[in-house]
Amino acid sequence: MLTIIVPLEEGYNDATRKFVVAKSFKLEMEHSLATLSKWESFFEKPFLGQDEKTFEETIWYIKEAMTITPDVPPEFFSRLTDQNVDEINKYIAAKMTATWFAEREQKKRSKDVVTAEVIYSWMVSLNIPFVPCEDWHLNRLLTLIRVCNERNTPPKKMSKAEALARQRQLNAQRRSQFGSNG
């Protein structure tokens, strides 16, 4: 969950001679499968697609899907600063996990369109419960799905050339370790 402080009024502090926020509003937001699903239901197109989102689509996502603070007056969203928008964008792009993947070979990006329903189907096939996972940060959920897929995929067999190269490498290590000629 992301919490941002939206300034509503500024005042001037005579002692420090700086403008300060005199009144603000705390806004709580989340970027999850549930919010993505809301956006796709409204706009009827993939959120994770290649197409850029319009300003209106982005604002709708922030106001109507991401915001979990109840009863926020619409005029508060016009008070979002550039810093607030940067915070929101960083939050959406954040990994939200300590998991990393060793990229063995460059995989071609799939041309499949990923929608909320596709992600839900992955969750069903991998026995990932909707509650609470659909409310996790979206990138964390996608990482869990990838981890489950990799664990369920049998290890790739080495080609004959890879196996011979590995054997040569091990033999060279052993020769240097034991000071032998082979």
Image (tube, helix red, strand yellow):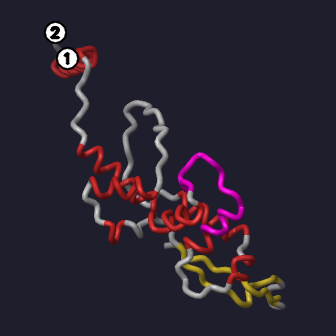
The magenta segment is 45-61
Question: Which residue corresponds to the image point at 18% horizontal and 20% vertical from the top-left?
Answer: 174
Q: Is residue 160 above or below residue 127?
A: above
- Residue 56, horizontal then vertical, whole percent: 70, 64
In the figure, residue 77 lies in which quadrant? bottom right
Say which quadrant the C terminus sits in. top left
In the figure, residue 27 lies in which quadrant? bottom right
The residue where tag 1 is placed is 171
Label pair 1/2, CB-CB below 8 angstroms: yes
Task: Choose between 26 and 138: the one closer to the eye.
Answer: 138
Give yes or no for residue 59 being in the magenta stretch: yes
**Residue 173 shows in this picture:** yes
Q: Is residue 36 above or below residue 161?
A: below
Task: Choose between 41 and 12: the one closer to the eye.
Answer: 41
Amino acid at the residue labelled 2 = Gly
> What is the distance, in whole Å, between disc 1 and disc 2 at their CAs?
8 Å
**Residue 176 shows in this picture:** no
- Residue 141, horizontal then vertical, whole percent: 39, 59
The residue where tag 2 is placed is 182
